[in-house]
Image (cartoon, rainbow, N blue to C red):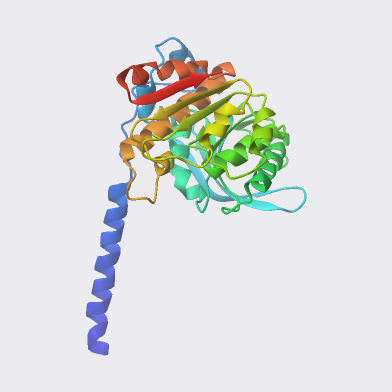
């Protein structure tokens, strides 16, 4: 047995090294933008004086990102939730974008999205909730979390403008975001990434949403999520929708643990979310984001735009 120890150890080390190399190979290598900004205000000035283009947001933004994993959010009723926080490294306060995972998924599957958003000057928080639902309950939990964050009682950090929170969710997590907004969550707006739901009461919740909502879907030629059409149909006004050509449901995560996903399409989702979040920050609406989609709509990279 002693004679086998060294070869065994060497084999384990080799396998470990190969896993590390493979993992590094999957990390996205995204070029950084040429835009220079010291503050979010500087960036806003640049963006509002140049043509809005989604391709701009395919690049990493001008800011470094400070990451804090496994932060515990504690509510007044002693409930606790895990989250990873990504701070944009610039002077001044900025809104917070909260990202919520879908069914049987985790906060880690939105870490690259969060990094991308934070590099463009907005702070981001990837939140972990029970990943099998029930999603109406998750939506109500999300409302409580946002209320606690807004009051400063749960996350006290001078870098975050707690009065300016944006919600984004994937799949069933998008349904939880919609439910949270219907329940009066204090947020600037919601971004739904290829939303899905089996909740019978969803239409009633959607009809109660009174703040801007943007649906960014996968290509329904390849993926048709449960009741995705409800989210546009039953939201009465202030809702926009667009689909990403060739994207599957899991491309709305970044990174993804699905081998069928495409990094380029994951970056498209991340850039669309970033444009949408900045649009809410700058104007309180999705008009800037919609303008940034124009070129990709003409090229056919984005599909089936609709607004009401």
Check the image and report above or below for 297 versus 140: above
At 36% from the left and 39% from the top, the residue drawn is 222
At 46% from the left and 23% from the top, the residue drawn is 38
Residue 185 appears in the rendering: no
Does residue 77 appear left or right of residue 12 in this picture? right
Query: Which quarter of the picture shows residue 243?
Result: top left
At 57% from the left and 54% from the top, the residue drawn is 132
Task: Give the percent coordinates (x, y) of residue 173.
Answer: 56, 43
Task: Give the percent coordinates (x, y) of residue 124.
Answer: 53, 37
Does residue 147 appear left or right of residue 17 in this picture? right
Task: Give the percent coordinates (x, y) of residue 308.
Answer: 56, 18
Task: Give the camera-side residue of 42 and 272.
Answer: 272
- Quadrant the N terminus occupies: bottom left
Check the image and report above or below for 185 versus 200: above
Task: Give the percent coordinates (x, y) of residue 247.
Answer: 36, 36
Task: Give the camera-side residue of 250 and 5.
Answer: 250
Residue 179 appears in the rendering: yes
**The furthest residue to the right:** 77
Looking at the image, how many numbered discs can be counted on the residues? 0
Query: Which quarter of the picture shows residue 96?
Result: top right
Check the image and report above or below for 94 versus 228: above
**The furthest residue to the top:** 49
């Amino acid at each position: 047995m002693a004679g086998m120890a060294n070869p065994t150890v060497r084999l384990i080390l080799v396998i470990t090294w190969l896993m590390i190399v493979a993992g590094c190979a999957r990390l996205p290598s995204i070029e950084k933008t040429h835009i220079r900004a010291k503050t979010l205000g500087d960036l806003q000035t640049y963006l509002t004086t140049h043509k809005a283009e989604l391709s701009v947001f395919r690049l990493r933004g001008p800011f470094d990102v400070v990451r804090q994993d496994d932060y515990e959010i504690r509510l007044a009723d002693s409930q606790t939730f895990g989250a990873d926080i990504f701070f944009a490294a610039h002077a001044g306060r900025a809104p917070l974008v909260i990202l919520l995972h879908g069914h049987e998924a985790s906060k880690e599957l939105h870490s690259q999205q969060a990094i991308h958003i934070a590099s463009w000057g907005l702070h981001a928080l990837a939140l972990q909730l029970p990943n099998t639902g029930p999603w109406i309950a998750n939506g109500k939990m999300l409302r409580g979390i946002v209320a606690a964050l807004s009051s400063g009682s749960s996350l006290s950090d001078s870098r975050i403008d707690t009065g300016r929170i944006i919600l984004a969710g994937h799949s069933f997590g998008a349904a939880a975001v919609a439910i949270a907004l219907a329940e009066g969550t204090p947020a600037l707006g919601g971004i739904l990434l290829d939303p899905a739901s089996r909740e019978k009461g969803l239409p009633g919740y959607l009809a109660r949403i009174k703040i801007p909502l943007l649906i960014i879907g996968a290509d329904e030629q390849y993926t048709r999520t449960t009741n995705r059409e409800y989210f546009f149909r039953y939201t009465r006004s202030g809702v926009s929708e667009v689909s990403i050509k060739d994207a599957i449901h899991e491309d709305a995560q970044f990174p993804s643990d699905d081998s069928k996903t495409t990094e380029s399409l994951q970056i498209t989702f991340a850039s669309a979310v970033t444009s949408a979040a900045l649009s809410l920050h700058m104007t309180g609406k999705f008009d800037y984001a919609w303008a940034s989609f124009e070129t990709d709509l003409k090229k056919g990279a984005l599909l089936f735009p609709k607004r009401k």
